[in-house]
Each structure stands twice: as C-alpha cells, then as structure tokens.
Image (cartoon, grey):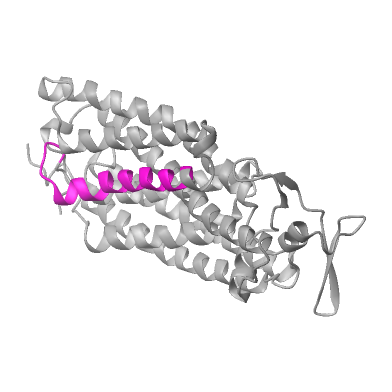
Amino acid sequence: MNLAAATNENLASISNTLIYSSMAVYMLAFFAHIAEWVFGSRSKVGRTAAALTGAGAAASGVKVVQQGGGTAVLDRPKVVTRSATGTRDVPDGPGAAGGTVKGDLWGRIAVSLTVLAFAVEAGGVVARALSVQRAPWGNMYEFSITFSTVAVGAYLVLLALKKNVRWIGLLLVTTVLLDLGIATTWLYTDSAQLVPALHSYWLWIHVSTAIFCGAVFYLGAVGTLLYLFRDSYENKLANGGNPGAFARSVLERLPAASTLDKFSYRINAAVFPLWTFTIIAGAIWAGDAWGRYWGWDPKEVWSFITWVAYACYLHARATAGWKGRKAAYLALIAFGCWLFNYYGVNIFVTGKHSYADV
C-alpha cells in the first residue's frame, strides 16, 4: 500500500493552518481573560473576610461597589458549607469578573474568543481525520490537538449548563496554548496512515474514551489546585492573618474552598467509571491485536497505576480521615500519573504502545 497516495496533502495543510489559527485566537482569549481579572478586581470588598470574622454583615446581604461614577449592585452571594474541610459557612466569590461591568464585558469577550478558537481547532482535527480517512489520534501530535479540543469543549458544555466555571478560563487557555505549542513544535508528525496494529474499530472506542477521560480529569485537577490555594487563603483569614493584595484580588473572587472541593470530587467521580471502561477496552483490543489481554506493557501498567490512584482518591473522599487537603494531594498525584502515562510513557519508554513518532 502506498501510504503517501493514501494521504490528502491539501487537507493535511488545511488542518495545520487551522491549528495555528486556533492558537492565535486562543492567545487573544488569554489576553481577554487577563483583562477580565484585572478590571474585575475586588480586593477591597472582602466577602470571605467578612464571613469569617462576622464583620461587614448587612441585613439584606447585598454588596454595593462604586465604579466610574456609577454603582454596580451585586447579587447576594450563595453561601455554602465547608463540609470537607471545616464547619464554617463561606460565600462563593463573584468570579473572575468580580461583579464589575468592565470585568464582565472582558469575560464575555474571552468566552466568545474561546468558542471561536474551539471551533477553529475542531475544524483542524476534523481536517486531519479527513486527510487520512481515519481517527485523528494515531500519534502524539494528533492525540494532543484532540485532547485540548475536548478539554475546551467540556469547559464550554459546563458553561452552557449555567455552571459557574468561568474561573477555569484563564488556566484552561494557558494550558491549551502550552499543549498546542508542544504539539506543533516537538510532537508534530506528518499526516500518514497507521501501523497495522492500529487498524481496528477499537481505535475509535478505546483512544477516544482515553482522551475524554484525560480532558475531564484535567478540569478536576484545575479545581483541586485552586481549592488548595483558596483553602489556605480562608484558613489564613480565619486565623487572623492578612493575605497580600494579589492574593486578596485573585483568591477572593474564586468559589469557596468547599465549592471547589465538591466540583473536583464530582468531576473525578463522574469520569472514573469511563476510565475503567477505557482500560477494559484496551485489554480487549490487545487480545485482538497481540493475542493476549494483558502483558504488563508500560502503557498498560501506568494506565492501571492511574486507575488505582483515582480509586484511592475516591475512597479517601468517602473516608472521614482523608477529606480536604489530604485527598486533594492524592487527586493531584493521580492526575500526575495520567500525565506521565500521556507524555512520559509514549516519549521516554519503549513498548508496544510506542506510536508517538517523536
């Protein structure tokens, strides 16, 4: 079979152009998110400090902030219970926009640009698939561009469901730019046909679920990381500390620590069964391709290690002595295992799954 003849070079070139174009739009979204955080600064309001100290409480619970000759009235914040880390009631922050008109405008611009970049990048992934008439995740480059597309898509779905997750936006587009930069610089592979072992319908099932799980695990990891920062901020305030202006400006606007904790737990718990299916599907495919369901290949081993790590985390969250920060550290270790399985095994370890082409 002539592999070059089986590749549509025109579509492959269009795919590359679309991926680079999406990076340019993501960069604009990055700057718009920066503007959202800057213009939405609420360092002088101190909702969390007021909740923890009992100061500044008003009968109506409504906050008012002056800006540029006008007044922006903020809705009463939702109060949540820090069930995993304590017993205090702490209000959620107003988000990156901080309740200001200018901040909210930049936030909406950032989301709009993210939607546009997602559409362009998705077009690049589809064009890559059409160029070779197969699933667009046969090597590390294709896996990377599809992974970032799915991660952004999952974020946009949460936004469409009216979930308060715009605080993820800045970290998300930053990570996507990093992922695409690595993909186009070091992982790029010309559009070509697959090695014989990958010619199977299981490529569509097994690898697509692995990509989806990784994208959702990433969102959970972002929530976990921000939970650790926000929890430290709340603890410092509760103990009479005085966080710096930057910490107040950023952390005050995040959801409460308990909200971030619950978000991460629910995200990880929801996708864990699908990760289990991913491993099972891979074993079935291995049986068809190599005549054995499990051979302790490095990719198989690290997929199982990742499964065990997330299983331990979910068990820890259900155990009274391992809630809060301890469980959060375990969640980050679990995602670290997934990242090593994603990059490290394919690039640095030789095995039957060495299809990175780098």
Residue at x-position 47% and y-position 56%: 172
Q: Quadrant of residue 13?
A: bottom left
User: Would residue 109 be visible to someone looking at this image?
Assistant: yes
* Figure quadrant of the C terminus: bottom left
Residue at x-position 40% and y-position 29%: 274
234 sits left or right of 227 in the view: right
Q: Quadrant of residue 75?
A: bottom right
Residue 138, percent from left and from top: 22, 41
Helix, strand or loop for the magenta stretch, by majority = helix
Residue 291, percent from left and from top: 11, 20
Residue 348 belongs to the span the image colors magenta: yes
Q: Nearer the viewer, residue 294 or 56?
A: 56
Residue range (magenta): 327-353
Residue 87, percent from left and from top: 69, 44
Residue 228 belongs to the span the image colors magenta: no
Residue at x-position 21% and y-position 61%: 186
Instruction: In the rendered view, tell whether residue 160 sits above or below residue 75.
Output: above
